[in-house]
């Protein structure tokens, strides 16, 4: 029973973060337009992937979670170059939200920005995290 409680306690913040990130991403798209909305959405996409990595593996180091999140985001972006996500997304709004539609090279940078930001925030929020960040400076 204690293992179950520890597992839930470790995963609950990541699950809550994932829900907040989805809400933030949808809010950005609803409230903003243009490049700012697009690139904020790209960064938040990777932050969501980061939160899902932490949800699955709560003890993951922030650098590893950032690499996985950026890697998944890059893989999805490169997959868009095949045209399949665009075709599938025309039939399903959910597929469009998850896979996007067309390849856009600047998105790759914003995925790295999102992964780095998520890792810094994650480190700062972990117990002893602010001290670790202060020691790193």
Image (spheres, grey):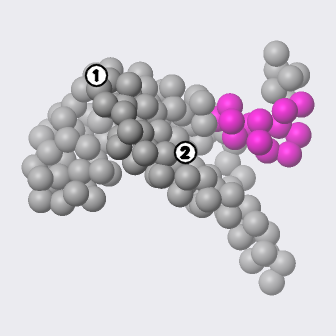
Part of the protein shown in magenta: 119-131
**Cα distance between the residues tagged 2 and 1:** 21 Å
In percent of the image, x 86 and y 45: which residue is there? 127
Return the residue nearer the eye: 4 or 117: 117
For mark 1, what is the residue?
A: 105
Return the residue nearer the eye: 59 or 17: 17
For mark 2, what is the residue?
A: 50
Q: Secondary structure at mark 2?
A: helix
Q: Is residue 53 visible?
A: no
Label 2 crowd (10 A; few <14 / some 14-19 / many >=20): many
Mark 2 or mark 1: whose residue is earlier in sequence: 2
User: Relative to residue 36, is residue 116 drawn left or right?
Assistant: right
Q: Is residue 1 magenta?
A: no
Quadrant in which the C terminus appears? top right
User: Relative to residue 131, is residue 46 drawn left or right?
Assistant: left
* Residue 59 x %, y %: 72, 53
Q: Secondary structure at mark 1?
A: loop
Q: Main secondary structure of the magenta part?
A: helix
* Residue 53 x %, y %: 56, 51
User: Relative to residue 3, is residue 128 drawn left or right?
Assistant: right
Return the residue nearer the eye: 73 or 19: 19
In percent of the image, x 31 and y 31: which residue is there? 33
Disc 2 vs disc 1: Cβ atoms closer than 8 Å?
A: no
């Amino acid at each position: 029973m204690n293992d179950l409680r520890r597992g839930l306690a470790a995963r609950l913040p990541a699950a809550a973060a994932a829900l907040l990130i989805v809400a933030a991403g949808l809010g950005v798209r609803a409230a903003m337009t243009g490049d700012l909305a697009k690139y904020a959405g790209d960064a938040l996409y990777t932050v969501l992937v980061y939160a899902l990595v932490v949800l699955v593996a709560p003890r993951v180091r922030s650098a590893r979670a950032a690499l996985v999140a950026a890697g998944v985001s890059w893989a999805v972006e490169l997959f868009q170059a095949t045209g399949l996500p665009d075709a599938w997304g025309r039939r399903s709004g959910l597929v469009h939200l998850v896979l996007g539609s067309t390849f856009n090279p600047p998105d790759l940078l914003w995925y790295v920005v999102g992964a780095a930001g998520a890792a810094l925030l994650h480190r700062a929020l972990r117990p002893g995290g602010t001290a670790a960040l202060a020691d790193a400076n």
